[in-house]
Amino acid sequence: MGNLVEIRGVTKVYRRGRETIEVLRRIDLDIAAGDFVALMGPSGSGKTTLLNLIGGLDRPTAGSVVFNGHRIDQLPSGLLSQWRAAHVGFVFQFYNLLPALSAQRNVELPLLLTRLSAAQRRRRAEIALTLMGLGNRARHKPKELSGGEEQRVAIARAIVSDPELLVCDEPTGELDRGTADEVLTLLQMLNRDHGKTVVMVTHDPKAADYAHRRLQIDKGTLVGGPCPT
Amino acid sequence: MKNFPLLGAALSRKKIRTILTWLSVAIAFTLFGLLQAVEVAFTAGADALDAKRLLTTARYSIIEPLPLAHLRQIEQVPGVTAVAYGEWFGAKYQNEGYAFPVLAVEAARYLDMYSEFTISREQREAFVKTRAGAVAGRRLVDRYGWKLGQKLPLSSEIHPKADGSTSWEFELVGILDADDPTVRGNTDVVWINAAYFNEGRMTGKDKTGWYVVRIDDPQHVRSVAAAIDARFANSPDETKTQPEKEFAIGFARQIGDIGALVVRILAAVFFTILILTGNTMAQSIRERSHELAILKTLGFSDRRITALVLAEAILLLFLGAGAGLGAAAVLLPVLNGVTGGRFPPLLVSAGIWGLGAAVALVLALLVGVPPALRARRLMIVEALAGRA
């Protein structure tokens, strides 16, 4: 299977006032389509920054990020937004649902950027929520849901526009063990049964066990090379 | 349309704050609706006037009379197509403290000159032929319940009769009405027959207060006015001729420049609203940096986010403006009833609605653009990390 993501010589430097911080240093990484990768490393090692670059939320200071043969790091802002909407689903540690919207409306958000009718958007959101086992929670607001349910709504939102890539930043960081396993099982199912490529940042070795391989980052560089889990 | 849920969510996020902001905008626009209606009522009379009409008065004061002999000379000025004349009678009706306008006019000429007023052919004939005849405007007739053929006892503090009494009596022979609501608003007037008045008055015989001159082309206003005044220059009765509209506006301003007053009050009100709403919007967007970053993460472009924030400001201002002007539209009929029709009818006209929409749009842009630009510049990574 070909590479979905190819990262070559990526360096990321942040400037805080007069201080310059090199967060990533000459990273090379290939992620095959259908892969499930766990990015691990200590706090401040650069794993979330790398995830942001893979998901098109940020741009590298140097190097290239290629998705399906197309460089995304050079796309203008508007096209990069379109690319994210079409190809990437995001799952965050703190769920990042809009509190004023119901679960259904939260899941529909990415579909507002498509030409689907209101009925089609509603139908797709229902399917995604049902797939996550939340068909009966569609009208609830986030504050009326448990942490595990919120994260499943977030996953439903991530998959509703059928992206190839799921980018997950500590998706189980706020969940207890049992709920974390449920969420990880869902991600595994999406990877295995629906062909989604998953890149997941985690501190949790047990969460990393769900991935095909682990990548260790330390001080902005990949260490030890890729190793299968 | 499909972004309405997002707009609704944004506005309902802090309901109390949104309601208070909406109320302050609504109250400002209620005031706008009421004051604009007053301003329009004061200028509507002038707006309805014919651009082909000039008014000739004594040069130094409108209370100085002019000789009736001027009539023939004015008629001879090139460009003049018709001339009418009238004089302020000044009257009180019975014990009413309110003195409505009573004008002594040459009936046929005045009716021809003010063709925007409607009157039946029979009543017109009666007015021309009845020496002590009078016609009254529809609003006065409705207010006092007058009937055709009844006597109108009027007292004039300005013009005593030859026998020294101030009591005059006229016969109501016609009703002045109008198809145009604006003109109808000016029908609280009585016209009496100038010939009868001239014959009975103690002083000022064969004089009149002003001449109304119709000209052939509105573009000749200045030249014809100058020609009329030139004709009487250096005579004992010099004239001042100006467009009737100009005269009416100047006359209205003698009780104060209502337009300027309204503009100043509204400027203060809207400036306050601008500060209040602008601060609220800015605060709201700052609080929602994280949520806006989420939308950007999901693929909402900078342009779309900018449009969303602007739409939020526009929606808030338009909801407030609509409610405010609606409240004014409801309040004005009540106000009209309370004043007993003594003032021109106040109403929220289509023009006021249009102006209100324009003001709301300008306010929305002034209030919405700064936070919209801030939202546009928002960096996703920084905002998600809570650093924006």
Image (cartoon, coloured by chain):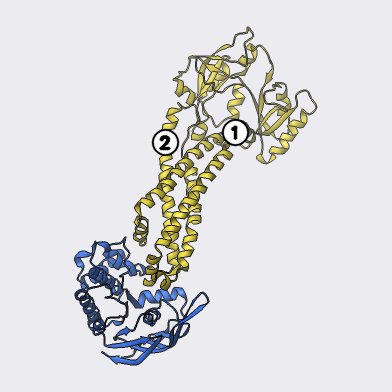
Chain colours: A blue, B yellow
Of A94 and B241, which appears nearest the observer?
A94
Q: Is residue B219 above or below residue B153?
A: below
Q: Is residue A149 visible?
A: yes
Of A177 and B176, which appears nearest the observer?
A177
For the point 49% across and 80% down, the residue is A20
How many marks overall? Answer: 2
Task: Indicate the position of residue B138 as horizontal and vertical percent values.
Answer: 48, 26
Please give the chain letter of the residue carrying mark 1: B
Task: Indicate the position of residue B174 as horizontal and vertical percent values.
Answer: 51, 21
Task: Indicate the position of residue A219 as horizontal and vertical percent values.
Answer: 40, 85
Task: Indicate the position of residue B20 as horizontal and vertical percent values.
Answer: 39, 48
**Other-residue count near label 1 (Cα within 10 Å), few / some / many at <14 / 14–19 / ≥20:** few
Which labelled disc corresponds to residue B232?
Answer: none
Q: Secondary structure at mark 2?
A: helix
For the point 35% across and 69% down, the residue is A115
Question: What residue is disc 2 on?
Answer: B331
Placement of the N terminus of chain B among the 4 image quadrants: bottom left
Q: Secondary structure at mark 1?
A: loop
Q: Is residue B322 above or below residue B200?
A: below
Q: Is residue A17 above or below residue B306?
A: below
Question: What residue is disc 1 on?
Answer: B256
For the point 22% across and 77% down, the residue is A186
Q: Is residue A223 above or below residue B207?
A: below
Q: CA distance from mark 2 to mark 1?
A: 24 Å
In the image, farthest residue toward the top? B163
Of A61 and B177, which appears nearest the observer?
A61
